[in-house]
Image (cartoon, rainbow, N blue to C red):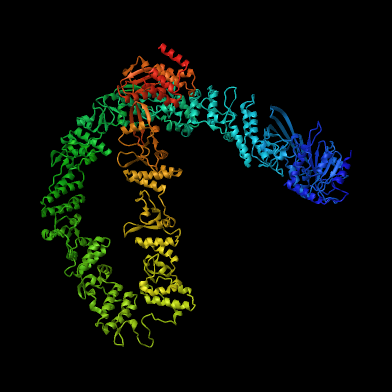
Amino acid sequence: MATPKEHIDEIRRTKFSIGREVNPLMEDLHQAVKNLSAELYAKDVHFLMELIQNAEDNEYPEGVNPSLELIITSEDITGTGAPTTLLIFNNEKGFSSKNIESICSIGRSTKKGNRKRGYIGEKGIGFKSVFLITAQPYIFSNGYQIQFNEEPCPHTNLGYIIPEWVEENPTLADIKRIYGSHAALPTTTIILPLKPDKIKAVKQQLSSIQPEVLLFLSKIKQFSVKEVNEDPSLNTVNAISISSEINFVTRKNIDADSYTLHLSTDEASDMTEKECGYYMWRQKFPVRQENQVERRLEVEEWVITLAFPLGQRLNRGMSSPGVYAFLPTEMVTNFPFIIQADFVLASSRETILLDNKWNQGILDCVPSAFVNALNSLITTSEDVPVSTLIPMFRFLPVCSSSYPKLNAVRESIKEKLRRENIIPCQSYSDQKIFRKHCEVGRLTPSFWDILKKGRKQGVSLHSLSSHGKYILNSSFDTEEYDDVLNFLGVEPVNSEWYAKCIRSSNLVLGVAEEDYLELLLFIAENWVSSFHRTDMKNVPLLKYVGPDGDVVLCPISNLTMWNGLSMICMSTESHHISWMIDWNREFRRVTDRYFMPKSTQEAIGCFSKRGTLLEWLKNQVKVCVASAYDFAVILYKSLQGDQQLAIAYVHFLYHSLSQHHLLNMHVDSLCGSIPLVDNYGHVITRRNGVLVPANGSKWVELMGANPWRELGYVELGEDYLRPATFAGTITKERQLMTFLKTHVAASDIPDISPPNIQLSAAYAPLTKKNAFLLLDWIRSLRYKRDLPAKFLTSIKTGRWLKISLSGSPGYRPPSQSFLFNSSAGDLLQDESVMVDIPLIDQEFYGNGINNYKEELKTIGVMFEYSEVCQFVGKHVMSLAASSALTKSNVFQILDFIRFLRLKVLPADEFIHSIRDGRWLKTSCGNRSPVGSVLFNEEWRAASQISDIPFIDQNHYGKEILRYELELQLLGVVVGFNKNYQLVTDHLKSQACSKYPTAEAILLIFECMRHCEHNSRSYNKLLQALKGDKCLKTNKGYKFPSECFLPNTDWDCLLKVFSNDFPLIDEDFYGTKILSYRNKLKQAGVVVEFELAAQRFSAVFKNRASSSSFGREHVLSFLSSYRQISNTNNQFPSDFRHNVCESKWLQTRLGVRRSPKECILFGPEWEPVTWVLPFKDGVKFVATSICFPQDPITIAPESVLSLLQCIQILRKDGNTLTEAFQKKVSQSWIKTVAGYKSPDQSLLFGSDWGSLLRRIDGPFIDEEFYGPSITAYKNELKEIGVTVEVSNGCSLIASYLDFHSEFSTIVRVYNYLHKKGWWPSDDTPRRIWIPNDSHNGAWIGSEKCVIHDKDDLFGSELNVLEKHYKSELFAFFSGIMRVKSHPSVDDYCKLWKDWEDSKEQLSHSECSSFWTYISKHWNKSTEKTVSDRLSKVPVESGSDGILLSSKHDVFIADDLQLKHLFKESSPDSIFVWYPQPSIPSLPRTKLLDIYSKIGVRKISESVHKEDITKLEASELKQVPEKGTVIGKGLLKLILGFLADPSMELEAGQRQEAVKGLLDLKVFETESAIEVSYKLSMSSGNIKSVNASRVMRWNWEDSKFFMQKKKSGGHKNKIEYATIFAKVISEGVLREKEEHIDALSELIKLAFLLDFDEEEVGYLMRSKNIQVFMEDEEFLSSAFSMG
């Protein structure tokens, strides 16, 4: 046998022809090896995986723990100059000769065809991959010492596979030194001197080697990496040592086994995890034929291993691979478990080939392996608590993978798991329960807490999974596992489950109060979202103290009584509870109210979330959370006209106030309307006031009778005076009266308000005592400001007040009486023009009468001098009214005023009382002093033009002049004192006729000056001037419009033709007339030069055409022209035009010519006009041009001449200067829109004609300039005029607002549309809306809309389709930003307007509105409509549809209730919907919209309550109850309960019907009724009563039934329906979902009179049978009866 060296020599000689002729294929073979190695591995470091794979495929001696060790060193033991060398040590059996020959070949691996034996390598070139990091690899094994070289051998030109024997460098001693002398060298060592550029990559790979690399290797148990250098500080590779150990193996079956593998690491660096256990599941699957591939033909079984890490995976901080092909790939699956199988790898070994059918077959088996593995982990662990198994669910692939093929595996796992009984359920026994996901439900965390607390307190939960769902194990049902449970498809239980659970357990009564409140809190927090519409409202949840003091439970559905109020109450304050309960006992027979137990209420007060709980109890459950005041209100509403209760209630209020349970304001509010017992013993609920009892009252003393009775006043009975005892409290005699006066307003004189009737006692003398009592009453009423008119009038006019008249006593009304001291009265009596003054008799009343001055004033008694004066004045005026006032009387009046003035007594009231009377004789007849005038010379001019009422001095004589001061006090005007308004007010109708004096005219002008603020007076004066020839001129009296006011600056011009211009005579009026220049101008007088020049111009023009225009006129005109030119006055343009155009200058030709046609010859002659045609001087135009301020003076010829000059300049190549352009930028071009600057002007041409007309914009006025203007198109464009049709949009648009002709505006819109005009953002967008053929208005685009298909918005928006054709709609929409259709906001605004202004809507309006809302319904629309609409349409019998508040309208989802309320209510309360239905507005959709915007359903809003109070005396017990509750009924019920879906055992069924056997049946003649009530937003309640016929009181086992009416199918069906319903509700209280089905069966049997044969057929037809045990129960029950 050859030695290793001889074997190598033989290979070199025989295989590679070394020493022979070189094979020409050797070079090609070299290149093939090189390329293959490079292509196979995209990364240099994948050589490491090949080496590990080779180590795994190696064979190991028995008793050896297979290991692979890698050492990297900077020592160059090979002598190749490599800076770093990698050594690989493997304790395998070593290289055999076949292995050596294989490594010297390509594709001749010794492992081929040995997959079944566990070999994992297959490519046959794995070792060659080392050439990517080394140029010379070395192998030392079993005596072989060889190296390979990357470079071609010089003998063969072939590299890579030619072995060379190694004599030295390295030697075994060198290797031993690196490995360490403490242990023997492993059998095989591979030495790789690294290429310099590969060192970093190799070190990185060694430092990041996966600790899980050994996970699926069956042989290698130890793997290590370290770096060895003389200086340890140079080490950069993280050393690691990895070991694996299998703890135990459990054989599951012939195809699968499982075991636990333990990986541990020893690493120099600080790794988070040092060790980890893995649950390994290995299962075999037969290879399917369709998945076979050539390279795996010998493999018959797929072996799939799944690794489940039992702790943190060992990953050294890197992402962990999820797919292994014995060794890790780089595929990160995102799954929490690892898949290992004999996958076909990509050449790079980085991934498996996902499209490979072999690999696909493996992946198809992975879900089954996973499900089996998970089952073995979870369901077969018999002695392990379920809570310790829950973490195993973390192995589920909850997160998706980035590989689609692996996502398919994930979905398949999910599907398979959902078919498995693998979900652990909660069990309170030793038996574990696992069910499918669809059978299991989750509970909320808060409910789990409640259940756990309940269990600790002894509540049985064994039936937890008996309500339609198995309940997930509590350890699993946590937020931590939400993602896992979602993956498994485990959903929460429905809301009904909670109701069943609570009903079937003792959670309400079996736990402490605090835990009971936690249960209520759970329900409260989920009420709206979950429980509101479930059976939870029928679960007995709420505790209350029953009549016997026991704690009783009440379901929420039974909480509301017939009147809509809650049956259960609780106090807001703990110290009120006992008080309320005691008093509630007094009223219990009428209140039907109960209180929560005190312990419950106190627990709520200490509860951490009492706010949330109380909010639910009050607002959702409707528990009455009552303060003492609320309780008082409840009692008040329960009084029901009972005399005893009404008295008791007043005692309750009195003691509640005295013991501080109620505040004063609360008592006052209640006492305002409490029922009171009157003196006849009647209970009065409505009153307008309260009288104290008559006995001993003041009102009886003064009035004698009760005048308040007809006014609704209650006269209290004597019951309120007697002592009484209620609720253990004692009230003494008369103790209530102070309370009643204070809080019920029980009143007596003087505190009571009188009725508005006459006081009969006032019409006769009153005693002194009663007089003072009456005054005290008036004092009180004054303070309250409550004196009725008739009452006061009777006191004022009644003759009950004792007076003294000139010393004689008598009785007078207070309104005719005075209260003075005697001396003042006498003085006034002497001077009061013979008027007697009645004075109150103070001797009779004494000084006490003076304490009532204010009261006496109130009833008309007079105290002041002013009142005396008024009294006297009235007497005087009565004389004047009867024409009895003589001249002497007038002087007496004046003397009396003088007396008062001299005595320093106030005369104002007297004067005021007489000054308006018409008793003073004037020039205009009898007049009042006010407005009359005492004539003197100052009034002389005024008397000429005004009819002023002057006092008739001929009647009164000169004596009247002595009373000027008194007359002034009376209002007479004395002296002129600039009283211009008086002159104006009395101006004569012909004030300015008959040649008025200068003083009169000047007075008129002065009046105008002082009346400028009064337009009416001013115009009156102005018209008086204009209407007559009132102004004196040099031509006589003339109308003002014919006159001129001379002015020294320019009157010379008028004097040219002096006979033609009437000048105001300044000598007649004086210079003062000049101060009224503006008034003269307003009267029509020419006062300004411009108008005078115009008047002169007209005269000038006429004179110039006649022969009367002589030399003197010309010279005079030229002289005046020169004089005026030297002033600031400017001649108007028409003046200049007339002067220049008129032919008034005589020329040498003998004919008259105009000035522009004349030349004034002289040494420096020049033309008068400024326009001359010339060509040679055009170049001076640009610099010398000057436009006049008024462009109207520019003649068309001048403009054309200017354009001609520009044309000449352009032809000569001259450009217009900037200065010239600036000058011509003024407004001087005449357009149809006035004078404009060139850049604001348009030139109309033929190309404009097809779109616009000349009037449509600022086009140049061609009529003014003539057609030749168009010849200068280019010149106009040069100076800025727009000439192209496409450039005119902005100007045309800016001129749009000046149009009001509709056709013009449409034409402009079309033009702008066609030319693509687009306005700037700040341009106002307004649209013309015509209202007839000639009128209209410009409206903002936001107030417009293009279409209104339903014709609803005519009053809200301007609808363009009514006015414009469709061609412009795109323009309006895009350019003008008009919306195409009304928006939801527009519709809501329209509806709001309808709400405010319309009493009714038409059906078409309503249908159109809601069709639109329905069509555009979404979340946004829902919010808008809900927020904006406060009213909705309601059904109406009329043609129109009414609108009503959406809070007072209901959806009729219960037709029986709808029928009841429609029959009883005159107003409709149900929402409208179209009838018949229309396709565009489905009824269901509309009702859904109503519901979402706040309209309530009738079934959810109505409150039902039994209202019949059955008295024992009215009841008659039915001795033979079998006629009602017979055997046939019980048999039917037992058969129904035996249905499997009911899940009731025999004992439970029989217990359910025992309640019927124990019933006591009573019959009554009285109607048994139920009340349905609806609460409206106003606080009112709509109620209807319906016949109930019968009632079952479950608590006391009593059954009440109304005596059956005779005859009629309707009555029988009604009776059967109600009977069936009542019985079903009583039997199935715990299973309400089956009530309707049972009710229907009982109704049918009732109609069959429970005939045994017919009921038997009915039961068979419904597949209902009665079992033997139930038959025996029935027989026993009825045999005993």
Vertical relation: 398 (above or below) 1681? below
Vertical relation: 1201 (above or below) 321? below
In this rendering, would 740 be left or right of 542? left
Q: Furthest residue to the top?
A: 1680
Residue at screen point 35% across, 72% down: 1263
Vertical relation: 570 (above or below) 1417? above
Q: Nearer the viewer, residue 45 or 952?
A: 45
Where is residue 983 drawn, in percent x and y?
Answer: 20, 62
Q: Nearer the viewer, residue 361 or 1385?
A: 361
In this rendering, would 1108 be left or right of 69? left
Asked which quadrant contains residue 386, the reply is top right
Where is residue 1659 drawn, in percent x and y?
Answer: 43, 21
Where is residue 1057 drawn, in percent x and y?
Answer: 25, 79
Asked which quadrant contains residue 363, the reply is top right
Asked which quadrant contains residue 572, the reply is top left
Q: Nearer the viewer, residue 708 or 1203?
A: 1203
Q: Is residue 1477 visible?
A: yes
Location of the C terminus by quadrant is: top left
Where is residue 1476 drawn, in percent x and y?
Answer: 35, 40
In this rendering, would 61 be left or right of 909? right
Q: Is residue 978 visible?
A: no
Location of the N terminus by quadrant is: top right
Task: Count every numbered label the image shows and give the total.
Answer: 0
